[in-house]
Image (cartoon, rainbow, N blue to C red):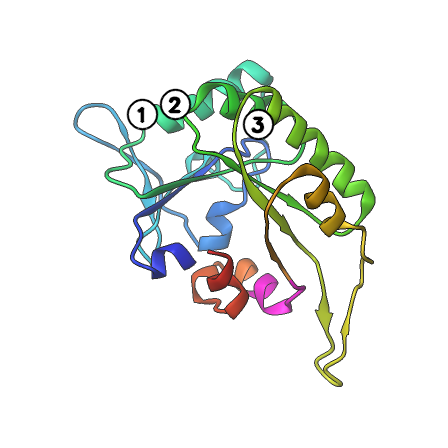
């Protein structure tokens, strides 16, 4: 959204096939249409961001997608190659955590400029992220940087900033791995409210613009 506000042409491919959440964040309910040549037309958000997600193709957003790896991989490849994205400056691909079929398909099969790792302060979460880091490195996919989510919380009453999930040593982690720390995302109830309401494009914060 911040990139779009900066007049960049941005698309989002929701590659979390079994746990898609992008349509809900943007309040999208329309079904993708077909192009004249048999391609798939993405659904465009209020702010002008084309989006494709398996949830846009289901009769009910609560309907589970119970697919094995080959079907997940085929869907991701189809979303990349058969969707009429148009001219884009950035195509963002949202992945589930871990090193499963969806991340492996994207890293092996799509022409990536790089990946952004997302972690939270807990050491346990960083262990999982390091697995993704090592997978990317083994497949020669550049790591553009790391984002720490759930980093801090500012009390709305006294203004004191706390570390609700502790300081798990993200700074040391990025230094040891030679990765850029792109930003630290605070806990902000307004983000959750906007996401639940499908109005994530209305959310503004300095840290969002700085990270973009």
Residue 130: image x %, image y %?
71, 34
Residue that mark 2 sits on? 78
Q: Is residue 198 above or below residue 110?
A: below
Residues at discs 2 and 1 in contact (Cβ within 8 Å) = yes
Q: Is residue 110 above or below residue 210?
A: above
Categorize mark 3 by other alpha carbons within 10 Å: few (<14), some (14-19), many (20+): many
Q: Is residue 121 left or right of residue 22?
A: right
Q: Is residue 146 left or right of residue 166?
A: left
Residue 83: image x %, image y %?
31, 30
At a point 60% along the width and 62% down the height, the residue shown is 192
Q: What is the residue that sits farthest to the left in this orientation?
A: 36
Q: Is residue 1 visible?
A: no
At a point 24% along the width and 38% down the height, the residue shown is 86
Secondary structure, mark 1, is: helix
Q: Main secondary structure of the magenta part?
A: helix
Instruction: For marks 3 and 1, give the one nearer the viewer.
Output: 3
Q: Is residue 150 visible?
A: yes
Secondary structure, mark 3, is: helix
Earlier-in-chain disc, 3 versus 1: 1
Categorize mark 2 by other alpha carbons within 10 Å: few (<14), some (14-19), many (20+): few
Q: Is residue 153 left or right of residue 106?
A: right
Earlier-in-chain disc, 2 versus 3: 2
Residue that mark 1 sits on? 82
Residue 102: image x %, image y %?
56, 26
Instruction: For marks 2 and 3, give the one nearer the viewer.
Output: 3
The quarter of the picture where residue 101 lies is top right
State the extent of the magenta-drawn residues as a range: 186-193
At a point 59% along the width and 32% down the height, the residue shown is 18
Residue that mark 3 sits on? 103
At a point 83% along the width and 58% down the height, the residue shown is 166
């Amino acid at each position: 959204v911040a990139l779009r506000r900066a007049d960049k042409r941005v698309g989002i491919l929701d590659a979390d096939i079994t746990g898609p959440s992008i349509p809900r964040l943007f309040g999208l309910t329309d079904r993708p249409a077909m192009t004249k040549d048999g391609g798939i037309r993405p659904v465009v958000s209020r702010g002008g961001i084309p989006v494709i997600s398996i949830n846009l193709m289901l009769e009910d957003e609560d309907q589970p997608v119970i697919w094995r790896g080959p079907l997940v991989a085929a869907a991701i490849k189809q979303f990349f190659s058969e969707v009429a994205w148009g001219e884009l400056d950035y195509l963002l691909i949202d992945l589930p955590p871990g090193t499963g079929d969806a991340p492996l398909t994207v890293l092996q099969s799509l022409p990536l400029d790089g990946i952004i790792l997302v972690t939270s302060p807990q050491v346990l979460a960083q262990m999982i992220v390091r697995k993704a880091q090592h997978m990317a490195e083994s497949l020669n996919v550049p790591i553009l940087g790391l984002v720490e989510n759930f980093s801090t919380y500012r009390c709305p009453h006294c203004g004191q900033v706390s570390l609700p999930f502790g300081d798990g040593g993200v700074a040391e982690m990025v230094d040891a791995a030679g990765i850029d720390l792109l930003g630290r995302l605070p806990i902000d109830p307004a983000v959750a409210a906007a996401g639940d309401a499908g109005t994530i494009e209305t959310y503004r914060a300095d840290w969002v613009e700085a990270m973009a």
